[in-house]
Amino acid sequence: MNNPTRPTAITLLAPHSARRTRLAERVGCCGGGVVIVPTAPERMRNRDNDHPYRFDSYFHYLTGFTEPGAVLVMLVGESTRSILFCLPKNLERETWDGFRHGPEAACTLVGVDEAYSIDEFDQRLPELLGNQNALWYALAEDKEFDDRIFAGLNTVRANARSGVRAPADIRNVHTLLDEMRLFKDAHELDIMRRSAAINTGAHRRAMRATRPGMFEYEIEAELLHEFRRHGSQSVAYNSIVASGPNACVLHYNANSRQMQEGELLLIDAGCELDGYASDITRTFPIGGRFSGGAKAVYELVLASQDAAIAACQPNASFSAPHDAAVKVLVQGMLDLGLLQGSLDSVLESGSFRRFYMHRTSHWLGLDVHDAGEYKVNNLWRPLRPGMVLTIEPGCYIRAADDVPEAFWNVGVRIEDNILITNDGHENLTAAVPSKVAEIEALMAEAREHG
Ligand SMILES: [Mn+2]
């Protein structure tokens, strides 16, 4: 019989199983032990009403399993045993909350060796912890789950006289997973390309839809419409739709202002597809044509982004794109009369931070600010093939007596998602125009054809 809410195909999640194997190798190299990775808890918004559920990124990376109430356990010794705990089948709860796989189907789906109801987790935990060299668990992420782990450890310690040993070490499994997540595999890159493609469509749609007199939230709605109709489950972060002076507020997301002719609109928005974020910023003229101080600042930020993207090369330092962007920005700020002094003196003093106060890049993946260390042994790490980072220089000029009036309230950021490849880089989000003539042509075309 067909259950209408049941997913149509049960597929073995092979890429996730390969990641568990690689994690087991790394844990094995560090002496083995028991790995415990819970998914995220559900969070209440008010009364019976939950926030939209989002699984834990580490758990999802290793399982592909999207239901709440699940825990992955891996026993890594001479061989590895993977165990999934998940919500049990419960037809009454499923009538209210939707389909659950239950342990039997989840075992096949995820490709683990065993699966049990989450209701058995606390009772089985002491046995899983017993006689393991180390517990690989991320402490202090979720206090309630920490308490369950501590209770399990205490039970094992209480049984010491029966010859059972508690783990001597508790080590952070996220440290190993962060390093793995930094290098995207083919399955991840496929999803990230699709996430980026949906997002480029949304930003193009926003450029086409914008007219003076509209409200910022109307453009936000265009973005959300485009995300959702292509299957994106959520935004990857709250959309920033910032017109005029709002563009100088870095995390503005009230999106409530009426947009005026002669102003710029800065949109920083990204969808999440099957867990993976995309993260694009574009800045364009609400009236359809760049002019005056806004055009000069836009051209400057675009030139700095070009320089930063060109610096995205395998073996280059993580800091190379930022350094390249800052150099171009500072020279431009001097040329425009925003700053006084020489390139070297401004770089030395950092006075440019008044107009460019954030860094140029962050890792991108399951999380919009993705996992992975930026420095190794206190040095910026080299870029390597398979890493994905954003390149997002900007310039934000508030109204002030010591700044030429032509630049007041001009805020510009341009952001793309860059994959480092064997011979350079690939811009995953190049399909949204960023050159002045291309943006103006797209907006003019949209106005002609309604
Ligand atoms: Mn970003």
Image (tube, grey):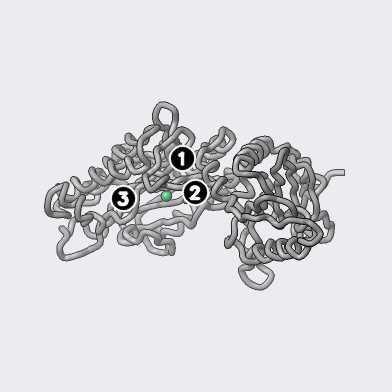
Residue 401 or 152: which is nearer the viewer?
152
Q: Secondary structure at mark 1?
A: strand
Whole-angstrom CA distance, mark 2 to mark 1, is 9 Å
**Residue depicted at 41% across the width and 26% down the height:** 423
Identified by mark 3, the residue type is Gly
Residue neighbourhood size for the residue with mark 1, other residues' Cα within 10 Å, grouped as few (<14), some (14–19), many (≥20): many
Q: Say which label, 2 or 1, has the lower sequence index.
A: 2
Residue 8 or 275: which is nearer the viewer?
275
What residue is shown with label 2? Answer: 370
What residue is shown with label 3? Answer: 394
Q: Position of residue 271 (x, y in %)?
A: 52, 48
Quadrant of the drawing holding the C terminus: top left
**In the rendered structure, are the residues bearing label 2 and label 1 in contact, judged by CB atoms less than 8 Å apart?**
yes
Identified by mark 2, the residue type is Asp
Q: Secondary structure at mark 3?
A: strand
**Residue depicted at 57% across the width and 52% down the height:** 234
Q: Secondary structure at mark 2?
A: loop
* On screen, residue 102 above or below 111: below
**Residue depicted at 67% across the width and 50% down the height:** 133
Q: Say which label, 2 or 3, has the lower sequence index.
A: 2
- Is the CB atom of the residue marked by disc 3 within 8 angstroms of ligand 1's nearest atom? no
Whole-angstrom CA distance, mark 2 to mark 3, is 21 Å
What residue is shown with label 1? Answer: 388
Q: Position of residue 103 (x, y in %)?
A: 80, 49
Residue neighbourhood size for the residue with mark 3, other residues' Cα within 10 Å, grouped as few (<14), some (14–19), many (≥20): many
Residue 185 shown left or right of residue 409 in the figure:
right
Residue neighbourhood size for the residue with mark 2, other residues' Cα within 10 Å, grouped as few (<14), some (14–19), many (≥20): some
